[in-house]
Amino acid sequence: MKEYFRYFKWVYLVLGLLLLTYLVLNAGHWGIAKAVNYQRTNTECVTQERVFDYGDVLSDKEEEKLRKLIAKREKQTGCDIVLVTLNESLEAYATELEPWVSNDEFVRVYAEQFWEKNKMGFDVPDGDGVILVDNWYREADGNIYTWLCTTGRAKEAYSDAAVNHILDNVYRYVESDPYKAYKTYVNDFYHDMLGIQIFHTYVPGAVPWIVGLIAAVIFAMCNWRAKKGQKTTTAITYVADRQPHFRVREDRFLRKSVVSHKIQTSSGGGSHGGGSHGGGGHHGGGGHHR
């Protein structure tokens, strides 16, 4: 065990420093969250509701808990945070407003219209905030679509990677535990807005492989020095009765037989998708489907 620690002590030191940095940053994040207390200035919003469970996927108790959480996070982020669940086709609604809109953006049209008609926005109508629309209805192509729409400061803060990150986290739980999924949406948005993306690091898929390869190379180099190759032969290995003795083996080629077969090949393919990005006008965001 001591030898392994000696070889990898610098790795443990780096990990320890990273952990310490993470704890310090989270302590700072907690301090900021306690200090900020944004006051809403939008007086034209037509509703005070933030949880619109039209799809009836939440219990009354879960809705109330989300309302309380959203009220707290809105004061900490200075953004309206809205959730809408549906269970109906949006094709007719969306195509009437945007005739050439694709299936995956029906929810985008709905989200933007919902936001604007209700004059959502923490600072001004159609201002700072975010809305998640999760439609449980399977459209004609067999998919269920979700859209995260950002406006104002939220649009400025969210890149495509950040949008994907929050939607991926929602989709991790949405089928098994919708309440947990939507709670994750609210909390992730709060962390992203307050931490300016510090607390959600987007690690490329190749990074774990590279780290593992580097660790393997270091381990091999350390062990190469510790365990040099041992001699397997000596001066008398092949000597019997003081006379050289070698075992001779040979293979005799008798015949050759070649059989050929024609291999039939076929081609085919498939596709899958997880997201799209865009937005109309001053809105941003992106979507996923399942």
Image: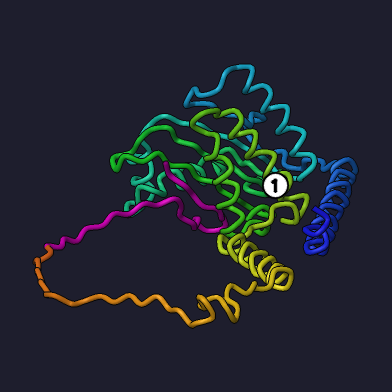
Answer whether residue 288 is magenta in the image.
Answer: yes
Q: Position of residue 1 (x, y in %)?
A: 79, 52
Pick the residue in front: 167 or 130. Answer: 167
Q: Residues within 10 Å of mark 1 (few under 14, many from 20)?
A: some
Rendering quarter of residue 228: bottom right
> Helix or strand or loop: what does disc 1 sit on?
loop
User: Outermost residue, top direction?
Assistant: 60
Q: Position of residue 101 (x, y in %)?
A: 36, 52
Give the residue drawn at x 77%, y 40%.
Answer: 40
Q: Which residues are magenta?
A: 264-290
- In what quadrant of the picture does the C terminus appear? top left
Provide residue 148's location: percent of width, then percent of height.
55, 46
Q: Is residue 58 left or right of residue 79?
A: left
Q: Main secondary structure of the magenta part?
A: loop
Residue occupied by mark 1? 124
Q: Is residue 247 left or right of residue 3?
A: left
The one of 9 and 153 positioned closer to us in this rendering: 9
Instruction: From the viewer's perspective, tell me whether residue 249 is left or right of residue 204.
Output: left
Say whether residue 286 is magenta: yes
- Please give the count of numbered marks on the rendered protein: 1
**Residue in the image at 38% along x and 38% along y:** 90
Vertical comparison of 98 with 259: above or below: above
Q: Residue at x 51, y 39 (%)?
A: 133
**Residue type for callout 1:** Val
